[in-house]
Image (tube, grey):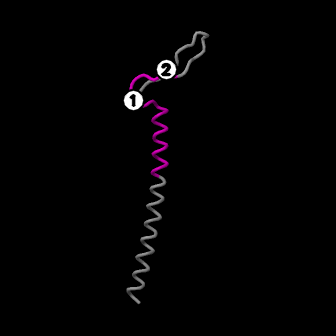
Amino acid sequence: MALEYKPRNEDGTLGDPVKLGNEETLAETTARLEKENKLLKLQNKANAERMEFMEDLIAEIAMKVYE
């Protein structure tokens, strides 16, 4: 994980964060994981709906076969 620090400005206030290293910072990791989590939840929902459709389809075919 990369480190961040805030340099002091000439007036004594803290400046913008400066990243050290090439790895992700904690904020970048959190943002990436939140985005990935949202995508995975949507994929899971789509798979569940697809599975429900397939179950209904199989039941319908079975009813036609056994008429």
Residue 23 is marked as: 1
Point out residue 17 in the picture as x, y percentages from the top left corner: 52, 22
10 Å neighbourhood of mark 1: few (<14), some, or many (≥20)?
Answer: few
Q: Residue at x 45, y 55 (%)?
A: 43
- Secondary structure character of the magenta stretch overall: helix
Q: Residue at x 43, y 78 (%)?
A: 59
Instruction: Give percent across and percent down for residue 42.
Output: 48, 54
Region rendered in magenta:
17-40
Q: Residue furthest bottom?
A: 67
Label 1, secondary structure: give it.
loop
Residue at left 52%, top 15%? 7
Contact, CB < 8 Å: mark 1 with mark 2? no
Task: Report the number of numbered marks.
Answer: 2
Above or below residue 11? Residue 62 is below
Point 48% across, 37% down: residue: 30
Q: Residues within 10 Å of mark 2 (few under 14, many from 20)?
A: few
Residue type pointed to by label 1: Glu
The vertical placement of 29 against 2, above or below, is below
Disc 2 marks a residue whose amino acid type is Tyr
Q: x, y percentage for residue 38? A: 49, 48
The circle drawn on residue 55 is none
Quick one: quadrant of the C terminus? bottom left
Residue under pointer 2: 5
Name which of mark 1 and mark 2 comes first in the sequence: 2
